Amino acid sequence: ETGVTQTPRHLVMGMTNKKSLKCEQHLGHNAMYWYKQSAKKPLELMFVYSLEERVENNSVPSRFSPECPNSSHLFLHLHTLQPEDSALYLCASSHSGIRAYNEKLFFGSGTQLSVL
Amino acid sequence: AQKVTQAQTEISVVEKEDVTLDCVYETRDTTYYLFWYKQPPSGELVFLIRRNSFDEQNEISGRYSWNFQKSTSSFNFTITASQVVDSAVYFCALSEISGGGADGLTFGKGTHLIIQP
C-alpha cells in the first residue's frame, strides 16, 4: 500500500456540480497538505493542516473547502468550480507539524480534475 | 520575482549522456532548505534530496549528484549516464525559516527531462 493515497485519480465535473477529493496517509504523519499543479505554473500550496492548526493560502477561492477530520484523512470539497480550476490536485503529508520548515513531503499521485 | 527559477523548461538527451538541471533561488533568510523532487508520469512527487543552507558539500548518490553554491544561489542537479527511467519532471524547491513552514515549499516550474533510447 502506498504511503499517500488519493481518490479519485480522474474527475470530470460541470461548473454546477459538487464533488470531493479524498486523501489518506498511512505514514503516521502529523501534517497534510493540498497543492494545485497547473500547466506551466509552479506548484501552489492551497492548505496545510495539522492537529494544532490550519493554514491557508489567501489567494485560494472559497469554492475550495478543505476538511481534515483526523490526522490520516484530508478532503477537498469542490463546488461551482470554473474551467480555470482544471488542474492536478496533489495531497502530501509530512512527519512534523506545520511549522517544521525542513520537512520532506510525501505526495500522492494526485487527482486530475477537469471542469467543463 | 520568482524565488526558485528553473530556466530549462524541457531537456532532451540520448540515453547514457550526462545532463545537468539548473536551479537558482532567491531568499533573504540565512537559514533555509533546498530540495529536489522527481515527478514521473504516474504523478506523485518523489523526494530526492534535502540540503540546508549551512552545508555546501556536494552530494553524490549513485548516478545523481548535487552542486550547491551559495555564492551564486544555485543548487544544480546532475544525472550521470542517464537512463530512460530518469525521464520525468524535476522540481527544485525552497523552504525558508521565516515562513516557519506554514508557507510550505516554494517550487520552481520544473524541468521536463526526456531521455531517448
Image: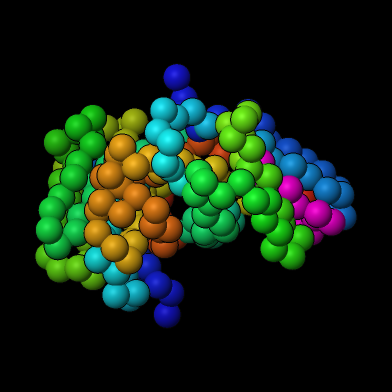
Image color mode: rainbow
Visible residue check, residue B101: yes
Q: How many marks?
A: 0
> Residue B78 in magenta?
yes
Q: Front-most of B108 and A11?
A: B108
> Residue B92 in magenta?
no
The structure residue drawn at horizontal position 26% and vertical position 32%, both measured from the top left corner, is A82
The structure residue drawn at horizontal position 42% and vertical position 80%, both measured from the top left corner, is A1
The C terminus of chain A: image quadrant: top left
Place of residue B37 in the rendered image (x, y in percent of width and height, measured from the top left) = 54, 52
**Left or right of B86 in this view: A79:** left
Q: Front-most of A36 and B56?
A: B56
Q: Is residue A60 above or below residue A75?
A: above
**Left or right of B82 in this view: A4:** left
Q: Is residue B46 above or below residue B72?
A: below
Which residue, as the protein is rendered here, is positioned at the far top? Answer: B1
Which residue, as the protein is rendered here, is positioned at the far bottom? Answer: A1
Place of residue B7 in the rendered image (x, y in percent of width and height, measured from the top left) = 63, 28
Q: Front-most of A26 and B47?
A: B47
The structure residue drawn at horizontal position 34% and vertical position 62%, both measured from the top left corner, is A94
Q: Front-most of A29 and A82?
A: A29
Q: Is residue B27 above or below residue A12?
A: above
Picture quarter containing residue A22? bottom left
Place of residue A100 in the rendered image (x, y in percent of width and height, measured from the top left) = 31, 54
* Residue span colored magenta: B76-85
**Left or right of B60 in this view: A36:** left
The structure residue drawn at horizontal position 68% and vertical position 45%, both measured from the top left corner, is B67
Q: Is residue A78 above or below residue A97?
A: above
Place of residue A54 in the rendered image (x, y in percent of width and height, measured from the top left) = 15, 50
Visible residue check, residue B86: no
